[in-house]
Image (tube, rainbow, N blue to C red):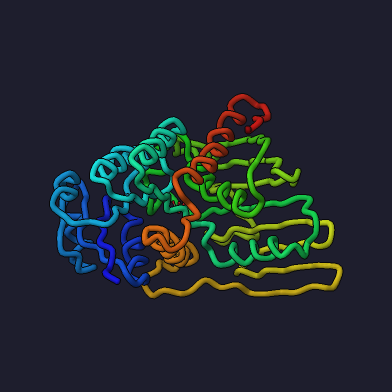
């Protein structure tokens, strides 16, 4: 089977890991890089042996023979680049958050639907190995009817050092991490019917909120709380681990530090340690996330080849964004939002 040829639009902090991740997946070939600062694209191209570099995305799409485009720019430019790719009839993979506003994300999904061209969102968090294992426990049914769940993502990691633009976002933690965490909530427990949220800003030198607490009623009446913070230093301050907990009528499960998964049922307790695959190119501080990039790539490539459905389509990711922006509305208005 011939490799699928693709171009990367945007060569900032995240793109080198995205590109390294693509190299782990057989059957793809990166043939061009775009960045508005050409030198940045040229440096990455040299390091990874990518043959062509552009500072004009139109020109790239005209000249290169592509099968898809991978967009890794700031969220504010996603719609522009997605539309460019769609105009060329090219399937698109776009980083999260899909867009900085819900209306924009809706337009993007509609644009792809109208042209009948696939739009996928590179939502990698749900592909973390410990989270996949947690999902398997939930799906096994051994915990019985589920009562309540909790997701904790609370860290003091200086996330702004590598991604300084995060300081400038008027809406920060819910768009940056909330997109991941609320997507995990949907992945584990299905859709939410009600949502309530409180936010805070603790860092004095940022524009948006760095703490968010979201409580949701999911279908089947399971109550799920998602606690997110970049302002907390606590015992389990182990960026970027996500801790998860669930209670059921017949048992419970928890995902703790270092991927330790504990399952308790009427028959006793089991412990497992779920470790992500290790890649030499991964930044040790982000290794858990970087490993999930590869599995997300694999899922999206399977969809591009028509072999298996993608989990994180634009349409699916809209539902996650609906939760993110409902959370902002709830926090601003101090009320429960009912979701249809
Ligand atoms: O994956 C991400 O969204 C990154 C980080 C984990 C650093 O927040 O922005």
| Residue placed furthest toward the top | 333
Q: Residue at x 68, y 46 (%)?
A: 225
Q: Where is residue 88 in the image (x, y as percent from the top left)?
A: 23, 45
Q: Can residue 335 be seen from the camera position used here? A: yes
Q: Where is residue 263 in the image (x, y as percent from the top left)?
A: 75, 68
Closer to us: 206 or 259: 259
On the picture, is 165 further left or further right than 187? left
Q: Where is residue 89 in the image (x, y as percent from the top left)?
A: 27, 46
On the image, which quarter does residue 68 sit in?
A: bottom left
Q: Which residue is drawn at 30% across and 71% down?
A: 1
On the picture, is 167 further left or further right than 156? left
On the picture, is 232 further left or further right than 221? left
Closer to us: 90 or 6: 90
On the image, which quarter does residue 326 sit in?
A: top right
10 in relation to 213, above or below: below
Q: What is the tally of numbered marks visible in this picture? A: 0
Q: Position of residue 196 (x, y in %)?
A: 66, 34
Quarter of the C terminus within the rendering: top right
191 in relation to 262, above or below: above
On the picture, is 141 further left or further right than 99? right
Q: Which residue is drawn at 70% across and 43% down?
A: 219
Q: Can residue 285 be seen from the camera position used here? A: no
């Amino acid at each position: 089977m011939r490799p699928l040829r693709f171009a990367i639009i945007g060569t900032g902090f995240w793109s080198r890991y995205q590109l390294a991740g693509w190299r782990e997946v057989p059957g793809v070939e990166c043939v061009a890089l775009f960045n508005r600062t050409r030198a940045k694209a040229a440096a990455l191209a040299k390091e990874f042996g990518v043959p062509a570099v552009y500072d004009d995305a139109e020109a790239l799409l005209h000249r290169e023979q592509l099968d898809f485009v991978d967009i890794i720019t700031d969220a504010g430019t996603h719609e522009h680049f997605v539309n460019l790719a769609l105009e060329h009839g090219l399937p698109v993979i776009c980083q999260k958050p899909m867009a900085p506003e819900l209306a924009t994300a809706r337009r993007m999904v509609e644009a792809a639907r109208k042209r009948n061209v696939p739009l996928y969102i590179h939502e990698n968090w749900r592909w973390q190995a410990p989270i996949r294992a947690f999902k398997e426990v939930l799906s096994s049914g051994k915990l019985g009817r589920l009562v309540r769940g909790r997701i904790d993502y609370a860290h003091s990691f200086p996330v702004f050092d590598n991604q300084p633009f995060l300081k400038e976002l008027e809406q920060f933690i819910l768009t940056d991490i909330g997109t991941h965490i609320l997507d995990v909530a949907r992945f584990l427990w299905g859709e939410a019917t009600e949502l309530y949220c409180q936010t805070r800003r603790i860092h004095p030198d940022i524009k948006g909120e760095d703490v968010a607490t979201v409580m949701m009623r999911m279908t089947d009446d399971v109550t799920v709380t998602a606690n997110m913070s970049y302002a907390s230093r606590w015992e389990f301050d182990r960026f970027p681990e996500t801790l998860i907990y669930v209670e059921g009528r017949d048992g419970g499960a928890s995902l703790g530090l270092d991927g330790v998964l504990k399952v308790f049922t009427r028959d006793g307790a089991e412990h497992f340690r779920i470790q992500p695959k290790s890649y030499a190119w991964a930044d040790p501080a982000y290794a858990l996330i970087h490993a999930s990039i590869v599995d997300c790539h694999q899922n999206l490539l399977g969809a591009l080849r028509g072999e298996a459905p993608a989990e994180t389509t634009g349409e699916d990711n809209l539902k996650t964004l609906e939760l993110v922006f409902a959370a902002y509305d709830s926090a601003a208005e101090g009320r429960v939002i009912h979701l249809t």
